[in-house]
Every structure is written in C-alpha cells, then in structure tokens.
Amino acid sequence: MSNLSDKLNSEAFWQDFMRRPEAQEALRQEQQQHLQQYAASVKESLVKEKEELKEALLDCGEELRRMLAPIVKYDMVHRLLYNTLTDCNKHGISLNDRLLEDHPFRERLQQLSDECKANPEHLKAIQDQWSEVVFDAKRAEDEEKAKYTTPLIPAQQDLISEALRGHDKPVSKRRLDAYTLKTHLTTAQQMRKDGNEKYQAGDYEKALERYTNAVGLLSPITGSNPNDTKLLNELYILVLKNQAAAALKCERWNTAIAAATDALSIDEYDCKSRYRRAQGRAMLGDIDGARQDYQAIIDEPWVDRDSKEAAKKGLRDLDKIQRNHKKSFNNFWAKTLDKGVFSKERAKDGEAPDAETDTSDAGATRSDGTPPPPLTRKQTLEVLEALRNDYARSDTQDKLRVLAEEVELDEEAFMARLKDALPPLSHSQFAWAQDTYSKADRDLRRDLDTSVTYWRVSDPSVSNLNSAIWQLIMQELMIKKRSKQMEGWEDY
C-alpha cells in the first residue's frame, strides 16, 4: 500500500502516466466535452442577449422603436446596442435615456435606419464589411495568443465550429486503433453497468445520465477494421436501448425516440428498439408512427412469441388511447378552437363563418357586412408564426407542464388558469407595423382575434397555424392524460 502511495505522489509517475495513449485519449475526451459545453454556452448567451435587448427596446419611446425596428436584426447593430445596454446597466440608466442623450450615436443609428429603408442591399454590404473587420481583428488576436498557448487539435476545432453552427454530433466519426478503442469500450461498459445499477434501484434520471454519457463516448468513433466496428456496434446498440428505456421512464419521449431510431439504424430488425420507439411515439401523439412500429414487430416472422404479444397489447392500448384522446380532445376543442387564439369573444355556437373566398392581402367587406380585418393576411401569419415560436419555447412548455400537474388534468381548470402560464402578447410581435406600439395589449389581442377569424375562412395557412398554436398550448395536458391512460404498460 505504501508503495502505491509513493507512486501516486511521484511526479515522474504522473508524467509517465500522461504519456500513455489511454490517458491522452481521456484528456482529449475531456477537452471535447469542455468545448461542447462552451459552444452551448455561446449559443445560450446569444439567445439571452436578444431577450435582454428585446425587453429594453420595449421600454424605449415609440420614435426610437420605429427607428430601430428595421435594423436591430443586423449583427453589428445588435452588438452596438447590447454593449450600450450593458454599460447602461452598470451605471443604472435606461437604454432609452442613453439613446436620447447620446446624439452622435443616435444619429449614426438613424443613418443606418434610413439606409435600410432606401437601400437594404447597401446596408447588407456595410454589415459584411463590419463582419470582415471583426474577423480580421479576431484573427490577429488569435495569432497573438497562439504564440503563448497550445493550439487546438483539428478535431477540436471542427467540434466547436460544428457546435456553434448547431450540430450536436460530429460530422464524421474518428477511426480508432484497437488499443484506443478497447479503452473506450471498457469505459462505456462501466458507464452502462453504473446505469443498470441506477435503473434497478429506480433512479431513472441518474441511469439516463449514465447511459447518455456512454452514448456520447461511443457515437463519434468507429473501429479501424470490420471486427472492431462490430464489437463497437454491439455495445453501442445495447447502450442506446438502455438510454431509450430510461428516457421512457423519465418521460423524455423525444430522447427515447431518437435513441431507438439510432439503434434501428444499426440493426433494423431489433424489436426492442422498435417497441420502445413505438412507446415514445404513442406518448407524443404520433399514433400512426407507433402503430407502424407495433405492426412491424408482429409481421416479422423471426420475432419471438412474447415480443409479438407485447406488440399486440401495445396496439390494443393504442386504440384505446386514441379513442379516449379523440373523445376528450374533440369535446374540448368544440368549446375552444372556434373561439380564437386569445379571447372568448367569438361567434356563438351554431353561427357558421362566411365561406366567401378572399384572395387579397388586405381583405374586403363581405356580403354579410363583415368589414376588412385590422391586420392583413401577411401580418396575421407573421404574428401567428411569432406566437408559435414563443409558445414552443422550453420555458413556456415547462409552465404548461406544471399547470397541467397542478390542476390534476382538469381541462376546465387548465383553461381558467391558462393566461398565467402563457407569455404576454408582446408589442415586438407586431414590429412590422410601428403604429401598433401605441396600442394597449387588449387592443392588440382584439385585432389579432378579429383578423384570425376573418382570414382562416379563406386561407388554410391561418387555420393551420391557429391549430398548431393550440396544439402547443394543449400538448402537455394531453401528454399527461395519455401517460395516465398508459399506466400499467409492462416493461419490455
């Protein structure tokens, strides 16, 4: 024991250890993980910057908003405004006051705004020149730093580049020699073993974490020969199936579907993966997809009897879920869907909408006297798109999920408290029409309600977007209801 302790405290021991291939590979893996985390944090910070700047601009005067609306989307303007906002926060003043006080800065912004209206292509060229200047400055800074730091290996550069462009997985897999691959497989096997222990103990979140780590270790690599690749795929598919099973327990339906699909890409006849993908699809309301997976298991001649019976039970439960869901959903939607997106001030039951076709963008007075709507067809679609994006955000969906649990799946109570979970209608969603900034929130809602009611009769896109928004609002409640209906499904 003392000999081991002496070795662990020996600098020579650690220097020799760090020269070993497995230690170098472990270090590279850790560096890649840090790079992934950094790339994710960069993307997250950009989203936060836009949200902060958006809130600050909403507090600015109408004239300033009118000036900034067409140019805030450009990176150079975003960066200038956000840096100004950061300085304002440090000194305890508002962005509105700073822009009013700093006449030269405001004049430059006004020039950009005027140029955008007069010649958008020229402003784009200015943006490109600005980007080039920033790139040159950054390149010079990186070259100076490179004199004193160890450069990233090419694989790391590719990794962070792809991550910043939104890719979660490397574009190509790294080919490992047999010795290095063995180290990866041993580590992944240990992660899987730890995950199995957590799963058996009922700690599904920790189990999912362990399996996900193992998937992350194995997904970006491949063997140097067919035999090594076969060994890798055998373990990889096991870990993916474990990940899918744990994800189902944690109600991470998309994760379960993705893991099962990846496993099926390796072995399309793996019935466990197909069964778990069917479960995930069913929970997300993809009844047709779930039915196809269950039926594929039943139709395969080499699938064992127990697997076929489990799939048949899944189909029976699927039919029951679909009937219950359809009945519940239709009852609810009969009361709500025709009432518009925001308010209850819609036509009474039995009042059919005018079916006249209107192909114009501005609308016209209909034969029954219905006047043109406040918003054009294009404006209505743009606002609905913005709302769909807002309602699809993870924070909004989290609030809807909590609300569904708090009301214990009671639809009437859910609707009564819905306004507390949804983000308020924002003036920024009407940025295409600057005069609406002066309108009260209630007026904006009424304008949109009226416009949706008018346009959805003649434009299926409006009706589809309207339905998509309600799907986003109601999906957490419906998922919870389906989950409750599926209680008792046997593990497979």
Image (cartoon, rainbow, N blue to C red):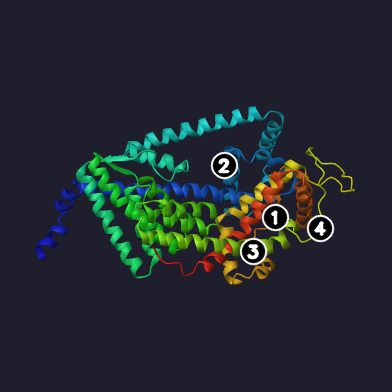
Circle 1 sits on which residue?
A: 425
Q: At which x and y percent is residue 82? A: 58, 46
Alpha carbon distance from label 3 to label 2: 51 Å
**Which label number is shown at residue 79?**
2
**Residue identifier under label 3:** 327
Left or right of 119? Residue 321 is left
Question: Sequence order check: which comes first, mark 4 or mark 2?
Answer: 2
Q: Secondary structure at mark 3?
A: helix
Residue 347: mark = 4
Q: Earlier in the sequence, mark 4 or mark 3?
A: 3
Q: Closer to the camera: disc 1 or disc 4? A: 4
Give the crowd class for mark 1: few <14, some 14-19, many >=20 residues within 10 Å.
some
For the residues labelled 4 and 3, the Cα–Cα distance comes to 23 Å
Q: Nearer the viewer, residue 437 or 242?
A: 242
Counting other residues with Cα less than 10 Å from the Cα at mark 4, is it few (<14), some (14-19), or many (20 or more)? few
Q: Could you tell me if residue 286 is visible in this image? A: no
- Tag in front: 3 or 2: 3
Which of the two marks, 4 or 2, is nearer to us in this view?
4
The amino acid at mark 4 is: Ala
